[in-house]
Image (cartoon, rainbow, N blue to C red):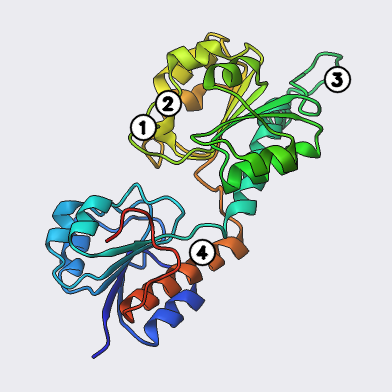
Amino acid sequence: MKPKVFITRKIPEEALKKISRSCEVSIWDKEDVPVPREVLEREIVNADGLYSLLTDNIDDELMERAENLKVISNMAVGYNNIDLEAAAKRGIMVTNTPGVLTETTADLTFALILAAARRLFEASDFLRRGEWKTWSPMLLTGQDVYGATLGIIGMGRIGEAVARRAKGFNMKILYHNRKRRPEAEKELGAVYVDMETLLKESDFVCIMTPYTPETHGLIGEKELQLMKKTAILINTARGGIVNEDALYKALKNGDIYAAGLDVFENEPVPTDHPLLTLPNVVALPHIGSASRKTRITMANLAAENLLLALDGKVPPNLVPYQI
């Protein structure tokens, strides 16, 4: 008998075919609407495997209904949407898709650095509104990127990839991490500093750290006040790492220069969110890994993780805190 798998969103055809060859598949195939909780509760009862996205809350209550569940395969690097402790006590494997989106997310991060520094969205809107009447010496002037100081909070794979791009812009690289990264220091010339020094000295502060209970609200009013008035905050990690009320006030009051945000604490972010009213915020809909090639690779990797676990094998991308 084929194992039963529930897929919580429409995924690339190649990955779906891979799973369908050896599993009985049920799928929530709407691209623009997350799977409703009641559907997830119903489908998980008989599922041997669950193929999930970051938008799906896989909690203890849900797992209690899933007597046959062997694996939760998350099509994402992050897995804060899954209660790992609840999974571990039930012997449910949890997998993710690390590595494959590193370069794509680093590209997007650097795009936000450039867009926020050089006010690209403001300039484009200015032109489209018909307000460009003449060349003017100080019209839409921004901040220089070349030769500036980049502070990276969280020097993991993506942080290192951003630092490599920064080297091409002759940027000085500071970083703060739970542990020092001697290899990054040697390869990239990155300098390890404490958080206060990074915030005070950086022209660009990039948040690259995982979202955990310890990093929730890591950047708040106190941290923002330490930054230069000309500094720019970039977040392509997770929205909950930044206190959005404090960020709004800092941007509104001119305590920092601008922000580039690909993530928000609650997604999708409502269109009346205060941050979206500010001209010095570049806001994107969580598209860090959104190149066609990368998303297909992620989907295939999540499928492979799922199938290996259902076959009684240990997938290579088992997340921490598993039994």
Q: Is residue 238 above or below residue 254?
A: below
Whether pointer 1 and pointer 2 mark residues with C-beta atoms closer than 8 Å, the reply is yes
Q: Nearer the viewer's eye, disc 1 or disc 4?
A: 1
Q: Position of residue 107 (x, y in %)?
A: 67, 47
Which sits in the foreground, 3 or 154?
154
Location of the C terminus by quadrant is: bottom left
**Gap between marks 2 and 3, in whole Å?**
43 Å
Q: Nearer the viewer's eye, disc 2 or disc 3?
A: 2
**Gap between marks 1 and 2, in whole Å?**
8 Å
Q: Residues within 10 Å of mark 2 (few under 14, many from 20)?
A: some
Residue type at the position of mark 2:
Leu
Q: Residues within 10 Å of mark 1 (few under 14, many from 20)?
A: few
**Gap between marks 3 and 1, in whole Å?**
50 Å
Q: Mark 2 or mark 3: name the one nearer the start of the chain.
A: 3
**Residue at the disc numbered 3:** 134
Q: Mark 3 or mark 1: name the one nearer the start of the chain.
A: 3
- Residue 214, numbered label: 1
Residue at (17% x, 57% y) in the render: 62
Which element is circle 2 on? loop
Residue type at the position of mark 3:
Thr
Q: Quadrant of residue 172?
A: top right
Q: Mark 4 or mark 2: name the one nearer the start of the chain.
A: 2
Q: Residues within 10 Å of mark 4 (few under 14, many from 20)?
A: many
Q: Nearer the viewer's eye, disc 3 or disc 4?
A: 4
Q: Is residue 46 above or below residue 275?
A: below
Which element is circle 4 on? helix
Residue type at the position of mark 1:
Glu
Q: Mark 3 or mark 4: name the one nearer the start of the chain.
A: 3
**Residue at the disc numbered 4:** 298
Q: Nearer the viewer's eye, disc 3 or disc 1?
A: 1
Residue type at the position of mark 4:
Met
**Residue at the disc numbered 2:** 218
